[in-house]
Image (cartoon, rainbow, N blue to C red):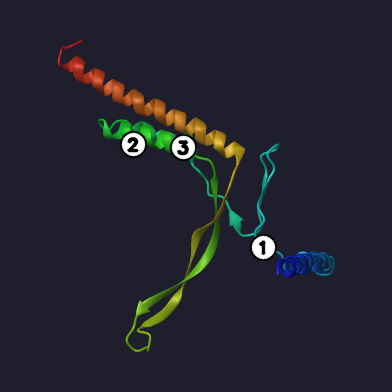
C-alpha cells in the first residue's frame, strides 16, 4: 500500500511537471506569434534611478498643487488651535506616505426616475469620472511629500506655540 502511494505521488509529480512545461511552452509560442495583444493591459514600471514612471494610455497622475496647499496652510494656521492641529495631522500623514495614486477616466451612466419604464429609471447620458487605477512608488513624489509634511508640521507647531505665547502675554504672565 505504501509503495502504491509513492508510485501515485511520483506519477502526479511528473504529470504536473509536464503540464507546466506545456503551459510555459505555449506562452512562449503565443507571445512570438501574437506579441502583446492578449497580455495584461496595465503595466506600471518605475525606474528607481531616474524616477521616471512609464504608464499605459488612459492612466494619469493628478496635479498635487503643492504650492497652493502650503499657501492655504498659512491661512489655516490663523484658526486658533484647530488650524494648528489640522496642519500637524496633515504633516504626519504626508511624512508617512509611501505610494502615489494613479487615476483613469471612466464613463458612468446617469439615470433619472421615470415610471414610464419597467425599471423605473431612464438613461439620460453619461459623465466622465476619475477612478483610482492603482498605486505606484515614486521616489521624487515621496520627497515632495516629505518636504510638504515637514513644512505643515513647522507651520502647525509654530501657530500653536504663537497662540499659547499670545494668550500668556495678553494676560501679563510673561
Residue 35 appears anywhere in the view = no
- The residue under the point 84% across, 68% down is 29
Q: CA distance from mark 3 to mark 2?
A: 12 Å
Q: In the image, is 117 to the left or to the right of 60? A: left
Q: Position of residue 169 (x, y in %)?
A: 20, 15
Q: Residues within 10 Å of mark 3 (few under 14, many from 20)?
A: many
Horizontal relation, residue 165 to residue 70: left or right:
left
In what quadrant of the picture does the C terminus appear? top left
User: Disc 3 or 2, which lies upstream in sequence?
Assistant: 2
Q: CA distance from mark 1 to mark 2?
A: 40 Å
Quick one: which residue is furthest to the top in this view?
A: 174
Q: Marks 3 and 1, how far apart in space?
A: 31 Å
Residue 81 position within the rendered picture, expressed as x and y whole percent measured from the top left: 26, 30
Give the quarter of the figure containing the N terminus.
bottom right
Above or below: residue 138 compared with residue 149? below
Mark 1 or mark 2, which has the lower sequence index? 1
Q: Residue at x 35, y 23 (%)?
A: 158
**Residue beneath disc 2:** 86
**SS category of the residue bearing label 3:** helix
Q: Earlier in the sequence, mark 3 or mark 1?
A: 1
Q: Nearer the viewer, residue 157 or 64?
A: 157
User: Image check: 171 left or right of 80?
Assistant: left
Mark 1 = which residue?
41
* Residue that sits furthest to the front in the current view: 1
- Determine the image quadrant of residue 85: top left
Comparing 91 with 33, the one in front is 33
Residue 27 position, x and y percent, is 79, 66
Q: Pointer 1: residues within 10 angstroms few (<14), some, or many (20+)?
A: few
Q: Tell me the element at label 2.
A: helix
Mark 3 sits on what residue?
A: 94
SS for dot 1: loop
Amino acid at each position: 500500500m505504501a509503495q502504491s502511494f509513492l508510485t501515485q505521488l511520483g506519477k502526479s509529480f511528473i504529470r504536473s511537471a509536464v503540464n507546466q512545461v506545456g503551459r510555459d511552452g505555449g506562452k512562449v509560442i503565443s507571445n512570438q506569434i501574437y506579441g502583446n495583444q492578449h497580455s495584461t493591459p496595465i503595466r506600471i514600471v518605475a525606474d528607481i534611478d531616474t524616477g521616471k514612471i512609464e504608464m499605459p494610455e488612459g492612466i494619469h497622475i493628478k496635479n498635487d498643487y503643492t504650492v497652493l496647499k502650503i499657501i492655504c496652510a498659512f491661512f489655516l494656521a490663523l484658526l486658533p488651535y484647530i488650524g494648528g492641529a489640522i496642519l500637524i495631522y496633515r504633516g504626519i500623514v504626508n511624512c508617512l506616505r509611501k505610494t502615489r495614486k494613479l487615476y483613469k477616466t471612466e464613463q458612468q451612466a446617469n439615470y433619472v426616475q421615470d415610471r414610464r419604464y419597467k425599471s423605473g429609471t431612464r438613461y439620460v447620458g453619461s459623465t466622465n469620472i476619475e477612478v483610482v487605477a492603482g498605486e505606484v512608488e515614486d521616489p521624487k513624489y515621496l520627497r515632495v511629500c516629505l518636504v510638504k509634511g515637514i513644512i505643515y508640521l513647522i507651520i502647525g507647531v509654530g501657530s500653536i506655540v504663537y497662540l499659547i505665547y499670545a494668550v500668556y502675554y495678553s494676560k501679563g504672565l510673561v
